[in-house]
Amino acid sequence: MTDAVRLPAPFARATAEAAAPVYRVPAWVAPALFLLPAFATLGLWIYWPLIEALRLSFYEWNLLPTAAPVYVGLDNYRNLLALAELRTAAWNTVVYTLGLLPLTVALPLLIALMTREAVGRAGAVYRAIIFVPMIIAPVVVAVVWRWLLNPDHGIVNKLLGGLGVPSLRFLQDPDTAIWTIIFITGWKLVGFSTLLFAAAMTNIDQSLVEAARIDGASESQIARRIVVPLVAPTGIFLTVLTVLHGAQWSFVYINVLTQGGPRHATTNLYYLLWEYGFGTFAIGWSTAAGMLLFAAFAVFAAIGLWAMRRTDRHAH
């Protein structure tokens, strides 16, 4: 066998350079291709509709393809801000948010603390029971509660009657209707929030708890001084989620049970958006109200994210 012919170093280098590709793909191209579907989805379903809603908020249009949108500038915003029903809906939105916070943050935290030692089959059964309302369709929940709260033959009023309490018109009385909607909405969300708190508690380093027990700390002291501070980021996350979506979560129950009544007692900003957009087809008013709502909640979301990062940094 003959030895392979070796080229001198300059010729070998020149041959290798000639064989190398002339154009090289930049390093950022591959990650960009992987992210492209996500960016395209966000742009198509979120940012483009948001920009289109902002554009339509300056027009008067009834959604009919035969009618051309009429540019009115800021008139939609001026007219909205002058409406008494908008102020009522805004106030009701605040009431929905504040009323839901105990049911989506405080009560789930208490339940998670009381059951954090539940393990094995007992823990699985408890989590299944408390999460069941979350997986039921909201329309089904609304129909069931309308039957339960019926003033004439509802089970709730039957039970109250047995205790000597007169029949209550939960959904027909302006003083109780909004609190009834808040209760129904919160009842459905308690399980979700409880599971989030339970998941956060399972991530706590158990050596901290054991060290506290060795030092003689009681279970209430451990919960108050170790567990609650370490799950505070989850509590802030649920608070932000409730503020941003609480009134939206109530929309289905308002639409099915009260239609915003009685006497606008249960109307909130989300229901008002739907009523303007698909009730009276005032798409300009609907999108203008939506942009005002988006601006207000964007500010709160920014504050909430800052608080979450700050609390998470202190917790760790």
Image (cartoon, rainbow, N blue to C red):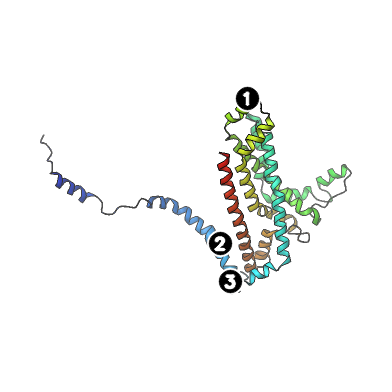
Inter-mark Cα distance, 3 to 1: 74 Å
- Residue at 65% x, 35% y is 225
Name the quadrant containing residue 289. bottom right
Q: Which residue is mark 1?
A: 214
Residue 66 visible from this viewpoint: no
Would residue 133 be found to the left or right of residue 10 on screen? right
- Residue at 76% x, 58% y is 265
**Could you tell me residue 136's position as x and y percent?**
67, 46
Crowdedness near tag 1: few (<14), some (14–19) or many (≥20) residues, C-alpha within 10 Å:
few
Q: Which residue is mark 3?
A: 65
Inter-mark Cα distance, 3 to 2: 20 Å
Inter-mark Cα distance, 2 to 1: 56 Å
Vertical position of residue 96 compared to residue 196: above or below? below
Would residue 231 be found to the left or right of residue 47 on screen? right
Residue type at mark 1 is Ile
Residue type at mark 2 is Leu
Q: What mark, if any, has residue 50 been given in the picture?
A: 2
Name the quadrant containing residue 261. bottom right
* Contact flag, marks 2 and 1 (Cβ < 8 Å): no
**Could you tell me residue 181's position as x and y percent?**
74, 52
Q: Earlier in the sequence, mark 2 or mark 1?
A: 2
Element type at mark 2: helix
- Residue at 12% x, 44% y is 8
Residue 79 visible from this viewpoint: yes
Image quadrant in which the C terminus is located = top right
Q: What mark, if any, has residue 51 been given in the picture?
A: none
